Amino acid sequence: MNSSLLALFLDKYPDVWLRFMEHMNMNTMAVLLSIAIGVPLGILITRNKTASNIVIGIANLMQSIPCIALLAFSVPFVGIGEKPAIIMVIIYALLPIIKNTYTGIISIDPKLKEAAEGIGLSSWQKLIKVEMPLAMPFIMAGIRISTVAAVGTMTIAAFAGAGGLGWFINMGLIGLNINMVLLGAILALVLALLIDYMLAKAENLLVPEGLKPVGQIKNDKLEKHTFQKVVVAGLCALLMIMPLGVKGYAYIKDATQKTIVVGTSNFTEVFILGYMYEDLIEHYTDFKVERRFNLNGADFCFSALTNGDIDTFVEYSGTALMNFCKLPMNSNSEVVYNQVSETLLNKHNVVTSKPLGFNNTYVLSVRPDFAKEHNLEKMSDLLAISNDVILGCTAEFIHREDCLPGLEAKFGTKFKDVRALDATIRYQAVTNGEVDVIDAFSTDALLKKMNLQGLPDDMGFFPPFYAVSFTRGELLEQHPELKDVFSKLDGQISDKEIRNMNYAVDVEGRDAHEVAHEFLVQKGLLPK
């Protein structure tokens, strides 16, 4: 471990402990439920060949679905947080458990089953005394495969606001911080190895001595063998009880407090704004803020808000106009704001704050050498040569009517190739010359870090993207004192100020919460 990674671990230690326990808790719940479903199901299908083909076929089919798709599919039904993440991992963990349980039992020599029946054992006794012990190596192998795979798969839970070790990985990707990515990945690796080691010990004690390879058979005394079982069982129980106990304590503690859930999308700027609202709410009221940061995009956040999973989040007026209100794009900022605030209030009882001050609009960006080579100074220059240009952009830019489809429809733009890229990876792609132009936002710190040139929108195409907060109307009706708190950020943040804060986090590596708090103090919104 290099010194910077160690320093990061020590700096983030309280958060590391929290995320580690969150990950253990979700992993434990998912695997226990997978075992409770998979083992009985694997036993049942050994009685019917047709049923086994159907069940294993369905399990194979479900595992072929991308995990992020399963996560997104679950959210509308169970909300955000741990539930969709646990459901996702259960589905992925079932196949090895079902298949290994089934394979272990049907692989037993039929003569042994006949002998069990011959001595008068009932079907239940035969299962418990003969089939399960003989199939145990197969079953435990399936459980170990599922458990280790679940640790890695569960990192995606961060996209649904469930936290876990995926939080560090996603934060590292957003800020191009390799140490943050390594922190999450190494901790996930440690957890996987720890759990697999404990399961290996459990398997060694559960498998009868006579079924082990000759080199592994030990003629230990009964007392020693019993003691080993107690120790391993205790450690396994601790692995299960510890995260559940921490979760239970947090649940009991939260039940005694009034809570507001603040959500954010998955990039630095909204994290900073989310922390600002958290600090203001907790300072000026007796509410405790529960974070649901790092949700997978604007639509995800809005769905969570209307479902009551979160109480407030920050988004942009142009995004709200197109995505939430389903209205045609408009370049007039005042018209856009009025349409958004009226539509959301009337249709969804969602209250829109006044603009926070800055306009984070789209800006097509290129490398300086590419701009010089093609004499690019503004967006119209780029569109004139679009047939020879490779665009790298987010999936959102490809599908939104105020983005690529609008450019194609209004100006006949046709890029040589369009590549859908992660929000952060697109910066690396354009810097490395793998794409020629990317979609970016005017306040992105990575524009400065990567030394990219933004092309001004001289065609007036992109709508205004003024930051505003969206809050459930029911919350403000029940607690009208919150209106004054939410209004404290109205008009307070300039383009330059938010750009500097983004730079402090994404480039200088400062903590987003610390940067947000410092800004509030400087503005006199919080005491020193």
Image (cartoon, rainbow, N blue to C red):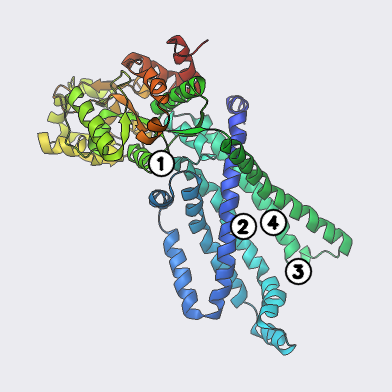
The N terminus lies in quadrant: top right
Mark 1 residue type: Gly
Q: Position of residue 470 (x, y in %)?
A: 34, 31
**Which corner quadrant of the image does residue 250 belong to?**
top right
Q: Residue at x 72, y 58 (%)?
A: 202
Q: Are marks 2 and 4 in contact (CB under 8 Å)?
A: yes
C-alpha separation, residue under disc 4 versus residue under disc 1: 43 Å
- Pick whichever of labels 3 and 4 is earlier in the sequence: 4
* Mark 2, other Cα within 10 Å: few <14 / some 14–19 / many ≥20: many
* Residue toward you, 258 or 392: 258
- At label 3, the amino acid type is Pro
- Determine whether 235 is above or below 381 in the image: below
Q: In the image, residue 157 lies at what x, y percent?
A: 48, 44
Write the residue at 87% across / 64% down: 222
Mark sitting earlier along the chain (2/4): 2
Q: Of the residues under marks 1 and 2, which one precedes in the sequence?
A: 2
Q: Quadrant of residue 186?
A: top right
* Residue wearing tag 2: 144
Residue at the spot of label 1: 308
- Label 4 is placed on what type of residue? Ala
Q: Count neighbours of disc 3 (C-alpha within 10 A) and say few if under 14, some if 14 to 19, many if 20 or more.
A: some
